[in-house]
Image (spheres, coloured by chain):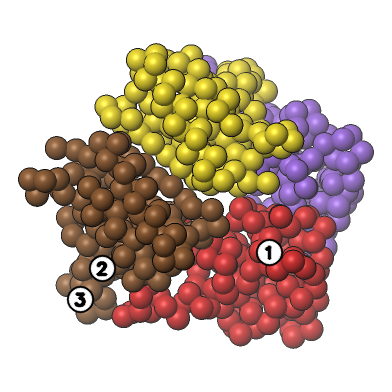
Chain colours: A brown, B yellow, C red, D purple
């Protein structure tokens, strides 16, 4: 199973709404089960550098089928996945990337959000995921 | 002047509609005046390899403020811009990329479409531009 | 709004002057609002490796609209943006990059300086910004 | 012997003047004997995609100590240097790049110009070289 464009657009619309509601400007990316971009939106005035970060967060979440922040806890100095960020042309391992599941619980893609604090990034990503 | 996300989403929606109308499945990218991605959509079943091509077409059209196909005519063997594609981390110089102008005629971004014949790609890109 | 070449050259001249005044040899880069290079100068005898660093500092400052050193405080091990440097083809997050604003307070570009201690790099970057 | 920043800035100023005189908007890059950037200027409104091309032309001219257009004649299909553009992270082999020599005839760097027809690019590059 793979996410559809209609689903990705619904997710991005919900994420945008949440972002506006909490007064932030986000880059929002959705990748499919193959970790390839399906849909993307950069809100007006959002950080330019967050464009790449949002896409990398979405890819990272799908690469390992877990929230990006979980990987970041393991990639610290001394951690078991120290500097895993060097793989896959660059991972982003702080919060803001979340896998997307279908009703059957299968992972069909992932969302990545960047543009504010990592707490806000995660909150907006979660709002996107919940829209499905 | 820079394109807004609302404008980019309107353009992508129009391009999707045109793509469906002519029975194609497209990757559609819109970049801003700085050649950075603003919005993107990959239609269900569209070629995966066209993801990168659509973004590169949009960037190429903004990099030189002209339709991508025009550059491709000059970059042929023996042409004045032979192998220009090696610049800017890779250009795509066949049709499907078109600059986007505002009412005052200023270039505010560009669209890139890939997923079918280059004629169809250009037709869909044009439909996107006309939506503004 | 975007920085002009005349503004960028004025900024680089002031930065060079400051650099000479404090006995350093700097690489100085100015990017526009789209994070693309507008002007650059490498002073005679300046570190070759600082060429890329100065450009990355300028881009980083514009990517996130803040001084590069601020990001570096958050990207430390255990910090909320740990290893953010892996994004955007490489960020530089120690001091020496500063956003450039116009009279209206809008960010129109950024400067990046590299070639000495990060304190000196920041001092020279600041002198450049103040020239506007 | 290596080009100095003062020499590079003189060359860029002369190239800018020539560019304005013939009604073009150019990206102008000067590299040193090590093929590393010394100075750069993007004139207001110049093509964004020519930024990278101007730097690649300057590097290419120094890499092989000849005008870029000469290499382009040899890199055509069937030519002895076919597709040499794939080397060195991308060469640009059409006109606009010229080696810079000192009074003793030693090559001390190179200039690369991009932003108009290749004839105009070469003319402006030549004006830069002659300023020395």
Characterize the local packing of mark 3: few (<14), some (14-19) or many (20 or more) Cα atoms within 10 angstroms: few
User: Residue D48 is drawn in which quadrant?
Assistant: top right
Parent chain of label 1? C
Whether discs 1 and 3 lie on one chain: the answer is no
The residue drawn where x is 44% and y is 59% is A20
Spatial separation of the CA atoms under disc 3 and disc 2: 14 Å
Element type at mark 3: loop
Frontmost residue, C114 versus B130: B130
Q: Quadrant of residue B103?
A: top right
Q: Which residue is mark 2?
A: A69
Judge depth for marks 1 and 2 and give the one in front: 1
Disc 1, disc 2: CB below 8 Å? Answer: no
> Are the residues flagged by discs 3 and 2 in contact, CB closer than 8 Å?
no
For disc 1, the marked residue is C106
Dot 2 falls on a residue whose secondary structure is helix
Circle 1 SS class: loop
Q: CA distance from mark 1 to mark 2?
A: 33 Å
Tell me if D124 is positioned left or right of B99 in this view: right
Q: Tell me where residue B99 appears, x and y as whole percent.
A: 61, 31
How far apart in space, not on screen, are marks 1 and 3 (Cα)?
A: 42 Å
Q: Chain of mark 2?
A: A
Q: Is residue D109 visible?
A: no
Residue in front for this viewpoint, A8 or C102: A8
| Circle nearer the viewer, 3 or 2 | 2
Dot in front, 1 or 3 = 1
Would residue D10 be seen by someone viewing this image from the given angle?
Answer: yes
Residue for point 66% across, 64% down: C107
Q: Residue A3: x percent and y percent?
A: 22, 39
Say whether residue C101 is left or right of residue A26: right
Residue A79 numbered mark, or none: 3
Which mark is drawn over residue C25? Answer: none
Residues at marks 1 and 2 on the same chain = no
């Amino acid at each position: 199973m793979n996410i559809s464009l209609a689903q990705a657009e619904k997710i991005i619309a919900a994420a945008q709404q949440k972002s506006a509601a909490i007064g932030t400007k986000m880059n929002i990316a959705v990748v499919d089960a193959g970790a390839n971009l399906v849909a993307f939106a950069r809100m007006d005035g959002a950080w330019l550098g967050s464009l790449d970060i949002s896409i990398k967060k979405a890819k990272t979440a799908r690469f390992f089928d877990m929230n990006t922040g979980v990987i970041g806890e393991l990639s610290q100095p001394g951690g078991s996945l120290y500097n895993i960020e060097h793989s896959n042309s660059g991972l982003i391992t702080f919060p803001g990337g979340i896998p997307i599941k279908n009703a059957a619980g299968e992972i069909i893609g992932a969302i990545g959000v960047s543009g504010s604090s990592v707490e806000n990034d995660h909150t907006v990503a979660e709002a996107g995921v919940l829209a499905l």
